Amino acid sequence: MSMKLQVSANLIVGSDGSTSKNGSSIGLSNPIDRARFHQLRSKCDLILIGGETARREPYKKTPVPLFIITHSQVKLQPKNQLAKQINLPPQLALVEIGRSFPEKSEINILVEAGPKLLQQMIDLNLIDTFYLTINHTQIGEQKIDYVKMLTGFSLIESSKDLDTELQTYKLTNR
């Protein structure tokens, strides 16, 4: 049986393209973003993050298995019993993740990584769907050019509620 990996990524940015505020994406979030965040998590089989995200964001507890792509050990306190650390490049990490779920024919992966790992995965065409939230009332640090980042994607859905824009993109250049 061949396994299909469905890889989605979720990212929030401020109006200036920032990906964090005071060292974390939580400072950019709002109730609209949190609702989308929980909706996406409810549909995934696992969450994939990078080591920096694991160190900066609250991943002590997750509703599904957590895979961390990292080159150095990450200590989650208290220890997340569902966390597994992988010291592999993204494309090989996905192969390893697939082996962790031999009973499934399709695995829905939600990537909640920072801009560096997201860009690596985008460059390798590993992201199928990209969910972008733009909070037009916040600015912060670690700015990215998300328009450039999503060059190989097509916008398939967009909505705006107050000062928050929710966009969904699909990979087009595979």
Image (cartoon, helix red, strand yellow):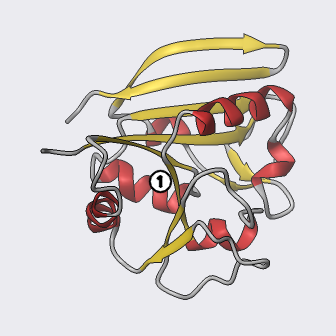
Mark 1 belongs to which amino acid?
A: Leu
Residue 22 in picture, x, y percent from top left: 86, 61
Q: Is residue 148 above or below residue 141?
A: above
Instruction: In this rendered view, identify the residue nearer to me: 8 or 77.
Output: 77
Q: Which residue is mark 1?
A: 118
Q: Residue at x 75, y 67 (%)?
A: 60
Residue 14 in picture, x, y percent from top left: 75, 39
Q: Residue at x 62, y 82 (%)?
A: 74
Q: Quadrant of the N terminus?
A: top left
Q: Residue at x 70, y 35 (%)?
A: 38
Say what secondary structure mark 1 lies in.
helix
Q: Is residue 40 above or below residue 84?
A: above
Instruction: In this rendered view, identify the residue nearer to me: 133 or 79.
Output: 79
Q: Is residue 90 above or below residue 105?
A: below
Residue 21 in picture, x, y percent from top left: 83, 55
The mark tally for this picture is 1
Residue 123 in picture, x, y percent from top left: 32, 52
For this orientation, the residue located farthest to the left is 1
- Residue 7, image quadrant: top left
Instruction: In this rendered view, identify the residue nearer to me: 76 or 70.
Output: 76
Q: Residue at x 38, y 59 (%)?
A: 120
Q: Quadrant of the C terminus?
A: top left
